[in-house]
Amino acid sequence: MKFSRLILLCCALISVSIVPWSYQNLSEAGEGGSRCIDCHTNLKKLIRLCWKVEALKPKPLKSEETSGEG
Amino acid sequence: MELYEKIYVKPAFLATDHGEIACEHCHGGDPEDDDWQTAHKGVIRDPTYPDPSTACGECHEDIVASAVSSLHFTLRPMKQAIEQRAGNGNPAALRIFDGAINRHCLNCHASCGQCHVSRSDYAAGGLLAAHRFIKTPSMDTTCASCHGGRVHGEYTGAEDDYEADVHYADEDMTCMDCHKASEMHASAEGVKTRFDLPERPACQTCHPDAVAENAAVRSHAVHQGRVACQVCHAQAGKSCFSCHVGTDKKGLPYYKCKETKMMFKIGLNPDKCTDRPYDYVVVRHAPVDPQTFDAYIKNGLKRFDSLPTWKPDTPHSIQRITRQSRTCNSCHGNAGLFLTKRDLAPWEVKANVGVVIPASRIPGLINEGAE
């Protein structure tokens, strides 16, 4: 009986320690202050930023001399 | 695709295994910087090309080890063919060719990311599914972005006057049903053409009866080992003629392809081997001609004749019954199906000596009544 209680306690301790660890891992990419995520997951923000990008860096041109199937 | 669509990341991606990796780990840049312009300094758009060992190799070491020398990653046979035609005696000329190949041809390569995460550079990029990693890429979006000019159209029946491939029309099969990951990721070291790759698809994998010793279908028994499957079962494929590349006045690369047409031609097999012992194979015309790279180096393809311009082909337009297999004499005695000297331009006669079928080897009419 004592042995099974000990196992239960160990399991509980392990799961309690895993939750914040995995949350921390996720937040590294997601919510940990990454400006990449702030912009790239926010459509409205991204559309406005893309207007600025396109004004500064027009789309790459393709040669008008290209003809026929590629 | 609009720019924002190309770079939008769905929040759900962050809950995936790959989404747990910090952006800058693969892409670089400064995730703390509030100014988007300086934050993107040093950002790597495709961290999987030319070296995927960090972005992919940390977890997928085995796949990356072979994939970096795969056909899709390197386009090795095409580069080798151009170098062979150029001759290997002049390192300075080879360097010029390498530059031209990089500029005009190798933008069709496929990196890990350009199959599993984004569209290809050739298709102007853009995330496939808001940065979700797609294990089995989509035929229409991913494969067709590079193979849309020829294979995809043949396969889906987009070409006028030709039916879609039966594997697509009746069985809903996609590219990846035959071209498995093992083939896509296989090393192409030492491979001369895609037909040399041991992992390539083979008809008999699904149709073992067709090559069985006592094949039930008489024409299978008669032609076995001598005629490639496609000779009877493929419809026409696309041939291209005289593609020239260069740089325009604005400094932009261009190509000019003189002619493209759907054709069906049977030629001699120039590369017989145990796996492909056939005498007769389907051939298509490659877009190269002696002046293809003249904008870079005049008459630079010194050994142009060292490879045929009509190459063995496997058109993706398979039907059980085709125009040439309706009856025995749909093919036998039908000289127009066979590649002869009359089909060649004067400048390519020498190059195709091993492929052109002499009149004596065009199978004659047979008495079908007596068969």
Image: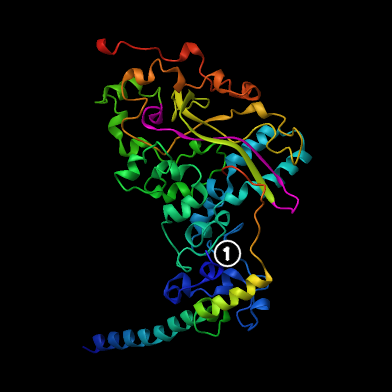
Q: In the visual, does A4 lie left or right of B338?
A: left
**Is B186 located above or below residue B207 in the figure?**
below
| Quadrant position of the C terminus of chain B in the picture | top left
Toward the left, the furthest residue is A1
The foreground one among A56 and B133 is A56
Q: In the visual, does B191 lie left or right of B87?
A: left
Task: Name the residue beneath numbered marker 1.
Answer: B54
**Three-letter code, disc 1:** Thr
What segment carries the magenta color?
A: B228-252
Residue B223 lies, in percent from the top left, at 35, 22
- Is residue A42 at least partly visible in the picture? no
User: What residue do we see at 49% from left, 56% from top?
Assistant: B115
**Is B274 located above or below residue B54 in the figure?**
above
Count of numbered circles in the view: 1
The foreground one among B93 and A61 is A61
User: What residue do we see at 43% from left, 24% from top?
Assistant: B278
Counting other residues with Cα less than 10 Å from the Cα at mark 1, is it few (<14), some (14-19), or many (20 or more)? some
The answer to whether residue A20 is magenta is no
User: What residue do we see at 56% from left, 18% from top?
Assistant: B341
Residue B242 lies, in percent from the top left, at 63, 34
Residue B14 lies, in percent from the top left, at 45, 75
- Is residue B17 at least partly visible in the picture? yes
User: What residue do we see at 38% from left, 17% from top?
Assistant: B332
Task: Look at the numbered disc 1 and give the secondary structure of its residue.
Answer: loop
Q: How is the image coloured?
A: rainbow
Residue A66 lies, in percent from the top left, at 64, 46
Q: In the visual, does B160 lie left or right of B97?
A: left
Q: In the visual, does B273 lie left or right of B297?
A: left
Q: Pointer 1 indicates a residue of which chain? A: B
Which image quarter: residue B320? top left
The answer to whether residue B230 is magenta is yes
